[in-house]
Amino acid sequence: MSSSQNVVTVDTLKAFAQAWNDHDLEALMSFVTDDCEFHAVGGPDLLGRTFKGTAQLREGFALAWQTCPDASWSDGDYFVCGDRGVAESTFAGTKSDGSRIEARMVDVFTFRDGKISVKNAFRKDRPAIAAR
């Protein structure tokens, strides 16, 4: 039987989302296993682009803020069922050319030992909103 310290809850996912909104890389890393896999929304492979392990996750997570320095995730809905969970939110951010992304997205999670071991991100393929 798992202790409550080894169980991911909706509150865990809310705190993880807050770390994204705070652009707090150290806080994000505290939620994931050392061998965590992050499958980004875009990339050359079936799962987008995969970042695996601490060093690559740091790179992959920071890329969101490099691409859209004002990146935010709002209107979150979350659920956890055993060792799986989902976060649904609205991603918004402005790219360097001034165009804006605003689209609903989901993260599908797998948990192990009270941490996130897989974060698989999906986002609606909505065209960027032109710069004003």
Image (spheres, grey):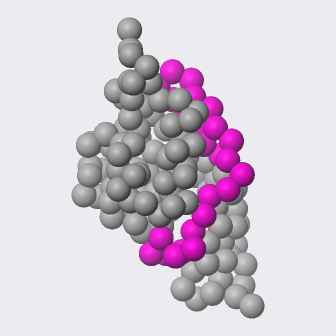
> Against 33, is 132 above or below?
below
> Against 118, is 53 above or below?
below
Residue 82 picture location, percent across and down = 51, 21
For the N terminus, give its image quadrant.
top left
Of 46 and 21, nearer the camera is 21
- 76 inside magenta stretch: yes
- At 32% from the left and 60% from the top, the residue drawn is 58
Q: Is residue 60 left or right of residue 34?
A: right
**Magenta span:** 65-88
- At 56% from the left and 35% from the top, the residue drawn is 11
Residue 42 picture location, percent across and down = 50, 62
> Against 120, is 62 above or below?
below
Q: Is residue 79 left or right of residue 25?
A: right
Residue 52 picture location, percent across and down = 30, 50
Of 20 and 55, nearer the camera is 20
- At 26% from the left and 43% from the top, the residue drawn is 34
Q: Is residue 44 visible?
A: no
Which residue reaches farthest top? 1
> Against 33, is 6 above or below?
above
* Number of marks: 0
Kindly indicate the quadrant of the structure image that contains residue 100. Answer: bottom right
- At 44% from the left and 24% from the top, the residue drawn is 7
